């Protein structure tokens, strides 16, 4: 057993050596700072010579004869790797590894445990506790020692890099969650601010419709009824804006009822009449066969079809025709609603992405539907998919586009 004085003399001698333990061949290489904790001064000197002979890196070595002295050195300087004898006067290698975590904040230097004959099982225990590697002292060579240290340093560097990346990902994920909550709060504020004047407009329409403000004709009654329903639909759309954030988490709830689609189409055409007249286009309905009532969320389907018709009107030139063809595929038990226009069409590269959120095709005009946020088609497809249906698109540039909604016509109560 070596005394503390002997270890201190070795440190002093190494500091006075102008070359130290660095080889001239490695002068241009990286420097690896090693702290060797071992009470065998002769073995420590042997390891120092091994490291001096290496041309893989510049090794600087500091020596300590006990765990307590090693921790003092760690408190004074930074090290890239620790070489620790498993059986120290005050602690075992496993205890050193565990104490290191408490003594020095992560990232702490990697540890290579060195064991005398018969201590491999104990060293393996230290590795399980967090040491990077272990070396049996009797088989240590210059090559194995350098390889163990450099591998430990590289593994530790990779560990730190992965920890940093994980930390960045956690921060980014938390930031996304925070922003999502901010967006949802923004939607709620906007919805509240718009619903207040919308509710007032609806009330005035209702008063007029009831004849309180004076007599109304049958035609006016019909128009006011549609206006009242449109107010309700706008209110529902603002609720949809809030619920957009819930679509991906599958929290949107559909209120399905047994409904006749023809009534929905009639109501839809009436709500779009002003836009059709303004754009001077023609809107036609083709009922290809009888459509039995089936189960769907009326407001949600109107929201989808309004979006598709609005886009068709926007991109169809005056004088053009927009057709809504409805058919019931009895064999497949599917109702198909195809909306075709004679507009400019959609390029193939855009057609692949039109259902992506926030994606907008081409221009930035301010036609009837406005530039929008690029959410309409994405929301429409997700609503259709919530009905266990599908929304697809076909288009030819210069000829027009067709969007097809497919909804299951099965009665869920019959199964």
Image (cartoon, rainbow, N blue to C red):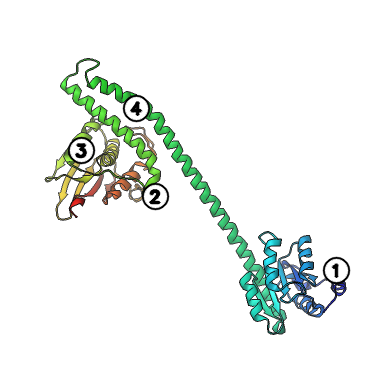
- Residue 15 is marked as 1
Q: Nearer the viewer, mark 1 or mark 2?
A: 2
Residue farthest to the left? 290
Residue 378 position in % (x across, y down): 35, 45
Residue 338's place in the image compared with 225, above or below, is below
Gap in angstroms between the C-alphas marked 3 and 1: 91 Å
The answer to whether any part of residue 270 appears in the image is yes
Determine whether label 3 and label 2 are within 8 Å by CB. no
Could you tell me which quadrant the C terminus lies in?
Answer: bottom left
The answer to whether any part of residue 337 appears in the image is no
Residue at image coords 25%, 44%? 256
Residue at image coords 76%, 63%? 74
Residue that carries the numbered disc 3 in the rendered image: 264
Closer to the chain start, of discs 3 and 2, is 2
Determine whether label 4 and label 3 are within 8 Å by CB. no
Q: Nearer the viewer, mark 3 or mark 1?
A: 3
Closer to the chain start, of discs 4 and 2, is 4
- Residue 198 is marked as 4
Secondary structure beneath dot 2 equals loop
Residue 336 position in % (x across, y down): 20, 48
Closer to the chain start, of discs 3 and 1, is 1
Dot 1 surroundings within 10 Å: few (below 14), some, or many (20 or more)?
some
Q: Nearer the viewer, mark 3 or mark 2?
A: 2
Q: Nearer the viewer, residue 402 or 194?
A: 194
Gap in angstroms between the C-alphas marked 4 and 3: 23 Å
Residue 53's place in the image compared with 235, above or below, is below
Residue that carries the numbered disc 2 in the rendered image: 249
């Amino acid at each position: 057993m070596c005394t503390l004085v002997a270890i201190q003399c070795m440190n002093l001698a190494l500091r006075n050596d102008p070359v130290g333990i660095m080889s001239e061949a490695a002068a241009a290489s990286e420097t690896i700072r090693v702290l060797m904790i071992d009470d065998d001064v002769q073995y420590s000197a042997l390891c120092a010579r091994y490291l001096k002979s290496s041309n893989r890196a510049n090794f600087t070595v500091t020596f300590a004869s006990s765990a307590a002295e090693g921790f003092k050195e760690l408190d004074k300087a930074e090290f890239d790797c620790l070489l620790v004898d498993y059986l120290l006067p005050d602690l075992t290698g496993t205890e050193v590894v565990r104490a290191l975590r408490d003594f020095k904040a992560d990232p702490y230097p990697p540890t290579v445990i060195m064991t005398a004959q018969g201590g491999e099982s104990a060293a393996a225990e230290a590795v399980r506790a967090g040491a990077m590697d272990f070396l049996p002292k009797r088989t240590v060579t210059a090559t194995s020692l350098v390889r163990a240290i450099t591998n430990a340093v590289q593994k530790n560097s990779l560990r730190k890099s992965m920890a940093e990346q994980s930390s960045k990902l956690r921060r980014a994920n938390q930031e996304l969650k925070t922003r999502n909550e901010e967006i949802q709060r923004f939607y709620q504020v906007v919805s509240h601010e718009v619903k207040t004047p919308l509710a007032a407009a609806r009330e005035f329409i209702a008063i007029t419709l009831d004849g309180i403000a004076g007599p109304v004709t049958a035609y006016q009654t019909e128009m006011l009824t549609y206006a009242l329903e449109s107010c309700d639909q706008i209110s529902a759309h603002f609720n949809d804006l809030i619920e957009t954030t819930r679509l991906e988490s599958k929290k949107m709830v559909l209120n399905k009822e047994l409904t006749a689609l023809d009534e929905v189409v009639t109501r839809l055409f009436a709500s779009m009449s002003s836009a059709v007249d303004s754009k001077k286009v023609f809107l036609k309905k083709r009922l290809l066969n009888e459509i039995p009532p089936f189960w769907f969320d009326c407001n949600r389907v109107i929201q989808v079809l309004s979006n598709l018709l609005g886009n068709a009107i926007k991109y169809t030139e005056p004088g053009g025709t927009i057709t809504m063809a409805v058919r019931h595929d009895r064999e497949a038990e599917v109702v198909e609603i195809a909306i075709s226009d004679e507009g400019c069409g959609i390029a193939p590269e855009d057609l692949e992405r039109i259902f992506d959120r926030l994606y907008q095709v081409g221009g930035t005009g301010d036609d009837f539907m406005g530039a929008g946020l690029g959410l309409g088609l994405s929301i429409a497809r997700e609503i259709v998919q919530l009905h266990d249906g599908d929304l697809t698109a076909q288009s030819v540039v210069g000829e027009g586009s067709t969007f097809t909604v497919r909804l299951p016509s099965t009665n869920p109560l019959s199964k």
